[in-house]
Amino acid sequence: MSDLNQEIKRRRTFAIVSHPDAGKTTLTEKLLLFGGAIHVAGAVKSNKIKKTATSDWMEIEKQRGISVATSVMAFDYSDHKINILDTPGHQDFAEDTFRTLTAVDSVIIVIDTAKGVEAQTRKLMEVCRMRKTPVIVFINKMDRDGKDPFDLLDEIEEELKINVRPLSWPIDMGQRFKGVYNIFEEKLDLYTPSKQLVTESIAFKDIYNPELENHIGAPLAKKLREDIELIEGVYPEFDVNTYLQGDIAPVFFGSALNNFGVKELLDCFIQIAPSPRPVQAMERVVVPEEENFTGFIFKIHANMDPNHRSCIAFVKICSGRFERNANYKHVRYNKMMRFSSPTAFMAQKKETVDEAFAGDIIGLPDTGNFKIGDTLTAGEELHFKGLPSFSPEMFKYIENADPMKAKQLNKGIEQLMDEGVAQLFTNQFNGRKIIGTVGQLQFEVIQYRLLHEYGAQCKWDPISLYKACWIESDNAAMLENFKKRKSQYMALDKEGRDVYLADSSYVLTMAQQDFPDIKFHFTSEF
Ligand code: G4P
């Protein structure tokens, strides 16, 4: 079916990620402007959560509520269907972001020119590297003084452990910022600070053309030529396949706020970024063009209204065409289900759709049937592999504070864990439940939701742990011995896998030395 193929080929599903404040929201908004999806700047509600708001997490949840609408932003641009997947800005919800990365085919990383590579960027890039996701880097805020661009590129290579290749190059920066030389399109893009809409672009194939002096002056022309010579000498020629394999990241410079360099980024993006890619399922590789529908749940968004305990399960379509009211198999339940009101997200609107294609994201209203990682198919027994869980950073015992509501508490914990709010470990020694999170906020979210959605009360008891390690070994005797020796620190994760909860980095190092045949993994899939 050629029209299925065409639909798939024109799709570009990606996420923009950054450390908070680097400019992700601003860039997203400018991309939407180009796509005609919005018409005025400021129309995109930032779902950014200010660091200062950490004590007021209800406010955060409200903002997360808003972010349902902006979870996926789809628009058409130049014959392409663009799906931008939004990710939460706050680092306490980093796991959400990691999971969203399982549903994209490529990523744009935004870096603040003055701040360079920051903590969150590092971690996000780790996930991209693991999945070999193609990455484009946008260095933002060139209208401000920042780091030397060559130093920045070195920093990115070193800190993000990826080779880079500039496809545009800045001409000065800050107040003296003149624009960029667009290496990819061989154009000179001139910057006017007051101009909010489009870049003045001049075709400029030969940077040795003396015309260059007329545009940017002799000293900057000289510097630009030297810089470009250096780039051509030091960095390999740009090769799309190397980018698609996730081995090299093209780099663009610009200023999202001033809408500078954004269209150029988008134009290059639609040319080089991948259309939906094949996805590895447990049983086989699934190719997007296959006629039969397959997809998986990568995110579940709970409704914060206690009177409507319904969620939206977000499905990434991996192959074929999804049709409304068709029968699809919920593989974990081994049950056929029909979906009468799947939603798609065009720009800012959520609307019911009759069909969607590989690469698209649809929302399915859900009342607790789905958990993250669930697979839907046209009938095939297939399991997509989810993103591994990372070792949490914080741990607490969860205890029942209302003996009459033990059942509700257990149900609530189970469902919240299925949604991926946090991770549950059960201590094998004393049977106590331990919740592991990325940040303090998640504990508050869990406590509040247990009370308001399940009528259960929990309290937290402190536990001092350093890391959760999934362990395995070919040496069965050593594994048994280890588990015996560490019995107080052995737990099971939700899937029943053995997890060693190390209480300090020292103890962990000692354990690694004493039990050389045991592998200690900091993610749940290895
Ligand atoms: P985030 O989603 O990555 O957290 O960042 P966001 O886009 O919200 O941008 C963070 C701040 O950086 C915002 O300022 C935004 O206006 C500013 N910014 C984004 N791009 C550029 C740029 O190219 N140049 C300059 N100079 N600033 C930029 P704010 O004051 O925190 O918010 P607002 O009150 O302006 O919205």
Image (spheres, helix red, strand yellow):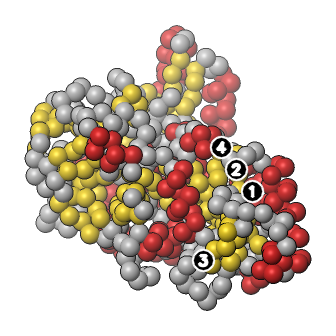
Mark 3–mark 4 Cα distance, whole angstroms, equals 26 Å
The amino acid type, in three-letter code, at marker 2 is: Val
Q: Which residue is mark 1?
A: 153
**Of the numbered discs in the image, which one, if any, rests on residue 199?**
3
Judged left or right of residue 184, residue 382 is left
Q: State the separation of the CA atoms marked 2 and 4.
A: 11 Å
- The type of residue carrying mark 4 is Asp
Mark 4, secondary structure of its residue: loop
Instruction: Tell us which disc is closer to us: 2 or 4.
Output: 4
Residues at discs 3 and 1 in contact (Cβ within 8 Å): no
Residue under the point 72% across and 67% down: 204
Disc 2 + disc 1, Cβ < 8 Å: yes
Q: Quadrant of residue 414?
A: top left
Q: Which amino acid does the dot numbered 3 rest on? A: Thr
Residue 239's tag is: 4
| Rendered position, 85 above or below 67 | above
